[in-house]
Each structure stands twice: as C-alpha cells, then as structure tokens.
Image (tube, rainbow, N blue to C red):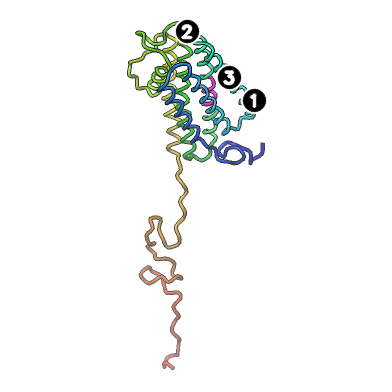
Amino acid sequence: MTDGEEIGPQGRHGRPARYGLLLATLVAVYLLSALANGRLSQTAQLVLVVAVAFLALRNTDFPHRSVARWVTLAGSVAAIAAVASSDSPVARGAASVWTGLLLLATVVIIVDGVLKLDTVTVQSIYAALSAYMLIGLMFAAFYGAIDGLGGTDFFVNGEPANIRTYQYFSFTTLTTLGYGDFTAGGSFGRAVAVLEALTGQVFLATLVARLVSAYRGPARRDPPPGVSRDGSASPDGGPASDGGTAANGGTAANTPEPEDHGVDGR
C-alpha cells in the first residue's frame, strides 16, 4: 500500500476519514431500538448494524476488507433468517450474539482508527462518540443473548425483557446512572453489567477526554503586517520605512534630508 492509499488520518486514497454518517446511522439504530420492539425491529436493527460495520470498514486500513465485508454480510443474512423464521428465545439469542460480536469488531476498528490520527479534528470527535454509542448497543445485544440462551429471566422481579429494556439498562449502566428500576438477576448478567460500567468509565476518562483536550479548531490566518490578531492596529504603527512617525520611535526614512549649502548658507 502506497502513501497515497493509506487510510489512517486521511482515509482511503488520501481522503479524510468521515464519521458523521456513521454517527447518524448509530443514532437511527438507537432510536429504532428505543421506540420499537419485536422481530421486525430486531431485523431492522441488524440491517442498520451491518450498514454501520460497512461504514467503519470504509475508514480503516484493515488489509482484508473485502473478506470482512463478505463475512459480515453472510453472518448477518443467517442471523436475519433465524429471527424471521422462528420466534424462539434461542433464535433471538443467537442473532443477538452475532449482533454483539459485529458491534464489538466495529468498536475495535473505530478506536484503532482514532488512535492513529495525528491531528484531532471534528471527525475524530464524531468517531469517539460513535464508539461510545457502539459500546452501549453492543452490551445491549449481549444482554439479549444472555436472556435468550440462558433459560432464565434476565431481570429480577419479572421485569419485561426486550430490545428496549436491554438498551435502556445498557446505557444507564454504561453512564453509571444506576436508576435501579432494572437489575440483572443472574450472576453472569451482573458480571457483564459491571464490566460495562468499568468500560464506560475508562473510555470517558481516556479516549474522549484526550481527544477533546487536544482538539484543534480551524487554522487561523496570520494577520497582515501592522495589524494585531484582534484586528486593531499594531502599537508600533508599522515599520519606519512605510511612513512610521516619530510617535513610534522611528524616523521618516522616506522624507528627503535638507541640502547642505555650507556655513554661509550659499
């Protein structure tokens, strides 16, 4: 791969990496999961997750992107077929496992790309926010997998377990809000919830904080000679050769000196 084809901070073929569309797609996934429920919503969520994975692969220098795309597509088609053909908890759990693994791989791709950026820009901030949302969605998928494949209720006190409650519980755990209205019942679910809380704290304390503190705004042009950066005139009034006056300590270099006619003035 030549220098012009490197992705890193410049994207593929020298183009800057773009994460705005990726972040917008993740917001759509979040809203879909928060407002809808059932097999149809899980299928639509998985389709959007595949789109997120493809957008992440577009900005990476992973050497086997074509293979990764085909594996992502094949696994997603199998997961969608399992959900569409059966309403059993095992089918939903298997599809949730695949969704969680796909989101995990996407997080790794995005974080790897962000860490390779030499200059922190608004695109890298978008990438960090995308990775944070991906972590919450990923753990929500794993909670669904635990509920579907575990054979017991995931939440205590018979609280409803579905895509909406998984996501709600995931993001309240990731942000350490801890409302307490939903609590994992099994020991494995509790262990995963603690792991998510630790992940959220470490992520915010390291990656996002470093990017925000190192953010560089648009480069400012240097002011013209004789003008300060706030737009006012320079205190020295410019160089003496350009008409500086005695007030700035300079001499009128362009003023002709009087002729010398000798002692008697002739």
Which residue is the site of mark 1?
Answer: 67
Query: Residue 170, percent across and down?
Result: 41, 20
- Residue drawn at (37%, 60%) of the image: 232
Question: CB of mark 3 within 8 Å of CB of mark 1?
Answer: no
Taking 221 as reference, is 35 above or below it? above
Query: Of label 3 and label 1, which has the lower sequence position?
Result: 1
Question: What is the span of residues highlighted in magenta in the rendered image?
Answer: 101-106
**Residue furthest toward the right?**
1
Going by the numbered disc 1, the residue's amino acid type is Val
Taking 32 as reference, is 17 above or below it? below
Query: Residue 9, percent across and down?
Result: 55, 38
- Residue drawn at (42%, 66%) of the image: 238
For marks 3 and 1, give the one nearer the viewer: 3
Going by the numbered disc 2, the residue's amino acid type is Gly
Task: Evaluate whether residue 124 shows in this view.
Answer: yes
Res. 144 mark: none
Query: Of label 2 and label 1, which has the lower sequence position?
Result: 1
Which residue is the site of mark 3?
Answer: 77
Q: Quadrant of the C terminus?
A: bottom left
Mark pair 2, 3: CA separation: 24 Å
> Residue 1 or 54: which is nearer the viewer?
54
Label 1 SS:
helix
Query: Residue 91, percent across and down?
Result: 52, 11
Going by the numbered disc 3, the residue's amino acid type is Val
Specify few, some or many for label 3: CA neighbours under 10 Å numbering under 14, 14-19, or 20 or more: some
Please state if 82 lies on the left or on the right of 167 as rendered: right
Mark pair 3, 1: CA separation: 15 Å
Q: Quadrant of the N terminus?
A: top right
**Quadrant housing residue 140:** top left
Res. 150 mark: 2
